[in-house]
């Protein structure tokens, strides 16, 4: 009997010791951990590095150390908040997308994060990278012209800055030259290269114009792509592929551009303390939704960083610490646009600030440092400090205005409880189903008819065609360009010819009679069809110039070549807008 008792006591003691050890292990679990979604990838894959922070409420975005052999292509943030026993806790997950740039072993160093004044560090991670299939070789019909002078079609590629800083905005430019004597149908096809070593490749559109090269006149189609280098050292951008369209004799071969080399240099080492990695030209502004609040009442702080640069990947500001506020990151997003070949926009951050005490509390100024590559120097912009008047929480005051204990007793009465839905006194007679009503089907038919009408209008917009004397149908733009070329070669007056050709072309495009078609009617119709305002303004200016040349020739300069070129370019751009 004594042996049985000793056995039971020993087992119980072992259980107590095991539970205590397990509790201590859980209590000592690191609050910051780093993981990858897979430890074996190819150079064609993407690695997702996730930094997890458990049980904290005020966490800044981790700054990744330098990771050799990968390019950084994106980041996302997710968080969950839990309120237990009056205490708010949160779990954060920061995911970084990395693409290997070479085979071998990628070593991810420890990531450091300061939480509550204590520095935490993750474990290092190694990922094995094997060589992927890589870019495919060009097809057999792919041509690389050896001598460009005098050719009817060729392609060139260039970069506007071949020695940028890490993260600096640059432009990759591809130009397709097609001789005006080479008649081709359809649009040129463009296949950009794979931009290894760059992030946030954004197409800023295309434009068309005329240019003389080696004694020939060419129609030039230009494509620009905005790039941000993410790795240091030399980077080679492989050739782009361009097709000249379809000739009257059938298909035509595709062509290669040349490759382009870029040497990426590191940022200077004299960065200020508030620098987190932003490269460009930025301003910062801050505002709050409340200037007066109660203790415990949340105040939303909105911070906007705007300017020129990679807004989608812009680092978060380094938030100042304050003992008067509890801070929670709410959300962040960016809105970007391309203007004059530059990526611009605004990135918006929201933080929830909860005052801890009453009085005149200050939200400290926020400094934001960035590197300006135009002047080769670091700059710092700051918000203004914001004053918030905080009063005591009314729920914590008694009837006499004195503070009330948060543990005061709460009484409930039976009248506090109400039924969610009262029971009916009698059963109702069911109504006929909704599908038996004609109004139901009419409501479904109206949107369908609207979609059909919209598609018909869109197809109608996409087909500004003309029928020639021999019965064939060709785009109106081809007729206008052919007539423009013939008039130009015969030496006719551009002030007379270009205006007439534009009006005839717009009459077909707008389905209007060319006779009596005024400039105001043209501008109004194009604006209603969602054409860009700069294009409409430029077209109107050219029409004014043709009218001035016809009716007041003494007031204008000759400018014949410029008028021919501008008219040809505008017809191309109008045709492009209609084919959007």
Image (cartoon, helix red, strand yellow):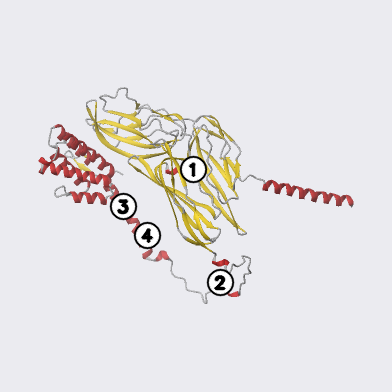
Q: Viewer-nearest of labels 2 and 1?
A: 1
Front-lying residue, 527 or 199: 199
Report, in whole angstroms, how far the alpha carbon at label 4 lies from the one at label 1: 57 Å
Residue under numbered circle 3: 454
417 to the left or right of 165:
right
Report, in whole angstroms, how far the alpha carbon at label 2 lies from the one at label 1: 57 Å
Q: Residue at x 15, y 32 (%)?
A: 489
Q: Viewer-nearest of labels 4 and 3?
A: 3
Q: Viewer-nearest of labels 4 and 1?
A: 1
- Residue 249 visible in this rendered orientation of the protein: no
Q: Position of residue 347 (x, y in %)?
A: 43, 47
Residue under numbered circle 1: 274
Report, in whole angstroms, how far the alpha carbon at label 1 lies from the one at label 3: 52 Å
Q: Earlier in the sequence, mark 2 or mark 1?
A: 1
Q: Viewer-nearest of labels 4 and 2?
A: 2
Residue under numbered circle 2: 419
Residue under numbered circle 4: 444
Secondary element under disc 3, as helix, strand or loop, is helix
Numbered mark located on residue 308 in the image: none
Secondary element under disc 4, as helix, strand or loop, is helix
Is mark 4 in CB contact (under 8 Å) with mark 2?
Answer: no
């Amino acid at each position: 009997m004594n042996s049985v008792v000793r056995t039971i006591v020993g087992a119980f003691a072992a259980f107590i010791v095991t539970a205590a050890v397990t509790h201590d292990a859980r209590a000592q679990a690191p609050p910051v951990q780093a993981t990858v979604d897979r430890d074996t990838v190819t150079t064609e894959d993407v690695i997702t590095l996730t930094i997890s922070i458990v049980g904290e409420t005020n966490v800044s975005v981790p700054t990744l150390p330098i990771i050799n052999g990968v390019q950084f292509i994106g980041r996302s943030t997710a968080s969950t908040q839990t309120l237990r026993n009056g205490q708010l806790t949160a779990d954060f997950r920061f995911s970084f997308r990395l693409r290997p740039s070479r085979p071998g072993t990628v070593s991810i160093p420890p990531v450091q994060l300061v939480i509550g004044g204590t520095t935490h560090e993750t474990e290092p991670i190694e990922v094995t990278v094997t060589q992927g299939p890589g870019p495919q070789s060009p097809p057999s019909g792919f041509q690389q012209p050896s001598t460009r002078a005098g050719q009817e079609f060729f392609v060139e590629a260039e970069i506007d800055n071949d020695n940028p800083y890490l993260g600096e905005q640059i432009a990759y430019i591809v130009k397709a030259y097609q001789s005006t004597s080479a008649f081709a149908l359809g649009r040129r096809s463009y296949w950009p290269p794979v931009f290894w070593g760059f992030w946030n490749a954004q197409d800023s559109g295309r434009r068309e114009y005329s240019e003389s090269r080696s004694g020939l006149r060419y129609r030039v189609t230009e494509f620009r792509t905005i790039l941000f280098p993410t790795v240091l050292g030399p980077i080679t951008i492989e050739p782009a592929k361009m097709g000249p369209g379809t000739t009257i004799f059938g298909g035509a071969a595709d062509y290669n551009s040349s490759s382009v080399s870029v040497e990426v240099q590191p940022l200077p080492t004299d960065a200020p303390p508030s620098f987190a990695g932003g490269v460009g030209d930025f301003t910062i502004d801050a505002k709050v939704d409340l200037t007066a609040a109660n203790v415990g009442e949340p105040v939303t702080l909105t911070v906007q960083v705007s300017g020129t640069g990679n807004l989608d990947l812009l680092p978060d500001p380094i938030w100042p610490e304050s003992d008067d506020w509890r801070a929670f990151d709410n959300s962040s997003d960016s809105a970007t646009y391309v203007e004059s070949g530059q990526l611009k926009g605004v990135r918006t951050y929201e933080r929830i600030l909860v005052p801890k005490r009453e009085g005149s509390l200050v939200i400290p100024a926020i400094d934001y440092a960035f590197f300006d590559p135009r002047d080769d120097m670091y700059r710092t912009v700051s918000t203004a400090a914001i004053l918030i008047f905080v009063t005591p929480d009314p729920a914590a005051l008694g009837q006499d205005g004195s503070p009330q204990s948060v543990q005061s007793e709460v009484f409930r009465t039976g009248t506090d409880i109400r039924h969610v839905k009262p029971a009916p006194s009698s059963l109702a007679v069911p109504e006929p189903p909704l599908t038996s009503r004609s109004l139901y089907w009419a409501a479904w038919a109206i949107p369908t008819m609207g979609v059909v009408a919209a598609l018909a209008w869109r197809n109608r917009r996409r087909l500004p065609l003309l029928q020639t004397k021999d019965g064939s149908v060709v785009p109106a733009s081809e007729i206008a360009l052919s007539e423009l070329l013939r008039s130009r070669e015969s030496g006719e007056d551009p002030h007379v010819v270009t205006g007439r050709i534009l009006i005839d072309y717009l009459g077909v495009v707008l389905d209007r009679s060319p006779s009596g078609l005024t400039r105001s009617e043209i501008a109004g119709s194009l604006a209603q069809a969602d054409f860009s305002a700069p294009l409409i303004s430029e077209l109107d200016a050219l029409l004014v110039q043709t009218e001035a040349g016809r009716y007041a020739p003494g007031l204008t300069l000759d400018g014949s070549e410029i008028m021919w070129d501008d008219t040809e370019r505008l017809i191309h751009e109008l045709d492009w807008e209609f084919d959007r």
